[in-house]
Amino acid sequence: MELDYLKIKKLLKKKFIVLFVTTFTWTFFNNFAEATILNNGHKEVIDHVWQIVYRDFLDSSGKFQKSNWIKLRKDFLSKTYSDSNEAYDAIRDMLSNLDDSYTRFLEPKEFNQMKIDTSGELTGVGIQIVKDKESDELIIVSPIEGTPAYEAGIKAKDKILSIDDIPTEGMNIEDAVRLIRGKKGTKVKLEILRGSKSFLKVLLRQKIEIKSVVSKVNQTKNGLLIGYLRIKQFNANASRETRDAIKDLEAKQVAGYVLDLRSNPGGLLESSIDISRHFINKGIIVSTVSKDGLKEIKRGNGQALTKKPLVVLVNEGSASASEIVSGAIKDNKRGKLVGKKTFGKGLVQSMRTLVDGSGLTVTVAKYLTPNGTDINESGIVPDIEVKMNINPILEKEIGTRRDNQYRAGEKELINIIKSKNQISQFNPETKNLKAFLEINKKNRVFSLN
């Protein structure tokens, strides 16, 4: 899915992936209309944003002070705004005081596009970008597989120096999005900095329809059937598509699964929870903590679709919802993680509709893995660290033995399957102690009770 203008630390703090709360909160001020009737209509949306932040904002930096925020309200509402553009600029200026790149204002068209994005339909060139708070640079988090940016060889951590010859120095994400987006069939020229080298890429804008989940059966050299499952984004369709894929793979009697979450920038919170429940029968999946310290715990619901061995592939572009699933599987010892350390985005945003049809994504909570780990800006370290191929591989080679990380994941999965089969062959009712010791020696499992 493309969220050109957002998604997925210092990039790793250089992030901007948005992990949305799917149950929107409409409780803050049922009588909002009466509470915010102002003489200037443009001030109403400013005050609406202010009220949301005052009530619900979770400060991850430790710098937010309500007294200063109250003073800001007086300052901003004392001014006169001649049109919506002036009001919108004021809102962005006000939000810049939060030191939180995830809490963002979106004009009506942008907000509508975001809602389309999370539904699985979008247009553009297929990149997610973030603004580095320290260097003020626009950084590409990840190109979306199968899109113009992906096909052109754009990579995670590439920096955008200019858009159609307009320098991006000092440019905010909203302005960058306006320049990158455009009519289907038109082109946009990006100047990219990778390492110390810069180059130009001309991309054709397209309507991008991306299926969230791709699945297939891979056969190992010794005949084992492996269910390969790649989730590209956690949109509204991802849970259903994952469920259908697992059922299909179970019917084909796969021996285990490789779940590929590489370069998946995240998406909907509930989608990540549902998908975790497809693999985890019981146990904590994730806990969210609000600004008031209220903790909500999500657990397995006893309806896992498979209990077969599992390996999860992750990399630097696996963020947010991907990290919820990865953390749940790792902490519950449900499977092994293979690849590179994940992005490190442990904050939850809620998407709010404002009085004039514009929108706000506001940080409302942080999430913890089942073991209580806060992975924000630190990421999740895989059990087995493996680099991706030095030379890029073709899209069709992802999830095959030409894919270094997949190959390592498949090898680990085979070891897990063999280990489980050997243990299941031991019959504790007999006196075959020698066989038991040989099995555990081979697997290097020793226990003295």
Image (cartoon, rainbow, N blue to C red):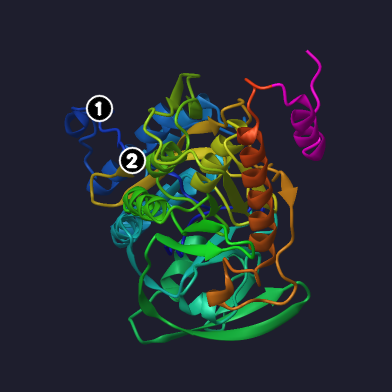
Q: Which residue is mark 1?
A: 29
Q: Does residue 448 belong to the magenta stretch?
A: yes
Q: Nearer the viewer, residue 77 or 338?
A: 338
Residue 328 visible within the image: yes
Q: Which residue is mark 2?
A: 22
Q: Nearer the viewer, residue 264 or 240?
A: 240
Q: CA distance from mark 2 to mark 1?
A: 19 Å
Is 57 placed above or below 146 here?
above
Q: Does residue 179 belong to the magenta stretch?
A: no
Horizontally, residue 15 falls left or right of residue 434, namely left
Is 322 placed above or below 139 here?
above
Is 116 placed above or below 165 here?
above
Quadrant in which the N terminus appears:
bottom left
Q: Range of the magenta residues?
A: 431-449
Q: Quadrant of residue 166?
A: bottom right
Could you say whether the residue bearing mark 2 is in a helix, strand or loop? loop
Q: Position of residue 385 (x, y in %)?
A: 75, 52
Point out the tag, 2 or 1, that comes first from the N-terminus.
Answer: 2
**Does the CB distance between marks 2 and 1 fall below 8 Å?**
no
Horizontally, residue 425 falls left or right of residue 351, namely right
**Residue at horizontal 60 percent and vertical 41 percent from the top:** 335
Amino acid identity at mark 2 = Thr
Tag nearer the camera, 2 or 1: 2
Amino acid identity at mark 1 = Phe
Residue 342 visible within the image: no
Q: Position of residue 43 (x, y in %)?
A: 30, 44
**Residue at horizontal 50 percent and vertical 26 percent from the top:** 284
Q: Position of residue 59 (x, y in %)?
A: 54, 32
Is 83 placed above or below 425 here?
below
